[in-house]
Amino acid sequence: MVKIAIGQITPLTGDINSNREKMKQFTIEAAENGAKLAVFPELALTGYNCGDRFFDVAETIPGDSTRFFEKLAAELDIYIIWGMPEQGINHVLYNAAAMVGPEGYVGKWRKNALPGHATDLTGPGAFPDRRYFKAGEDLPVFNTKIGKIGVLICYDIFFPELSRLLTLKGADIIVGISGSPSFEKDIFEPIVKVRAMENTVNFVYTNLVGIEGETEYWGGGCIVGAGEKQTKLPGTPLICKAPYEGEGITIGDVDIEHHGKIRPYFPVLRDLTTGMYERLVDCHRKMT
């Protein structure tokens, strides 16, 4: 079993130092309770409503914040994942996530799917991704001392193809981080469970919480197990559930080998065929 901490925070827009310090204190609390992985939401480092300030607050990965959390991870013997705007080459920005551990910098992910659907329900700053960020094109899985870990960022979770890719790359844990506003609660909660279910994989989800400017986030992170051998049900159990309000950490015990126990009895991966993907590619080409 590995203890994993979901950390949900209300970010102060553009205030990296304050947000970093808050994540540090929650990581210390997580480690004191035995956690070996602490996960923080999408753009937790800066908040989501930076607007044009994204160009000023974005950092390279590795960079200042990576080094800050590297030192903390080494001191506490813990892995840390958090969301942040990444400064790429030629001033190109990415909505990214970084991971460090006791051994130092582990790697990064870039959000593949950038939302472009408009809404008038959350005020200024809603879904600014396409205005500021370039889409990522890779989904690595990193081998760590606590298992193989892949990350999806917010809208990425809507695409079953991306979760399946991480699963086929050998992920023991898929981490989903988001900055989801309150009206999306009824969308995200079932999708997270389905991603665990259809891939028979452990899924760790965390979301921003509280109010940032005119945007209200719904928190509500969770950890969903890969499935149970006894009941032959994938996507169970619900290991832990974070509250819908309030900053803090929620800790769950995750069996990293869980998927190996359910997959012989719910063999979704066995029953995949190359033809399914070939037909999908062919149909998509005709659409585009």
Image (cartoon, helix red, strand yellow):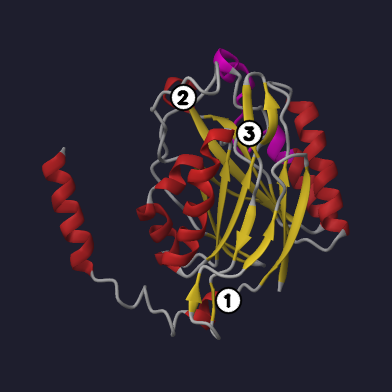
State the CA–CA distance, disc 2 to disc 3: 27 Å
The amino acid marked with disc number 2 is: Val
Q: Residue 263 at x, y = what percent?
A: 45, 79
Which of the two discs, 3 and 1, sits closer to the camera? 3
Image height of 111 relative to 74, above or below: above
Q: Quadrant of residue 114?
A: top left
Give the side of residue 149 with respect to residue 47, left or right. Answer: left
Q: Residue furthest top?
A: 52
**Front tag of 2 and 3:** 3
Q: Position of residue 107 (x, y in %)?
A: 58, 49
SS class of the residue under badge 3?
strand
Q: Residue at x 63, y 60 (%)?
A: 223
Going 54% across and 67% down the picture, which residue do you hit? 172
Say which quadrant the N terminus sits in.
bottom right
Q: Quadrant of residue 219?
A: top right
Q: Which residue is mark 3?
A: 217
Which residue matches tag 1? 258
Q: Earlier in the sequence, mark 2 or mark 1?
A: 2
What's under tag 1, amino acid-wise? Answer: His
Magenta range: 51-67
Label total for image: 3
Q: Secondary structure at mark 2?
A: loop
First of labels 3, 1 by sequence position? 3
Is residue 57 part of the magenta span, yes or no?
Answer: yes
Decide: few, some or many residues near mark 1? Use Cα within 10 Å; few <14, some 14-19, many ≥20: many
- Left or right: 215 in relation to 138: right
90 or 176: which is nearer to us? 176
The image quadrant of residue 137 is: top left
> In percent of the image, x 54 and y 34: which residue is there?
183
Comes first in the chain, label 2 or label 3: 2
Q: Amino acid at mark 3?
A: Tyr
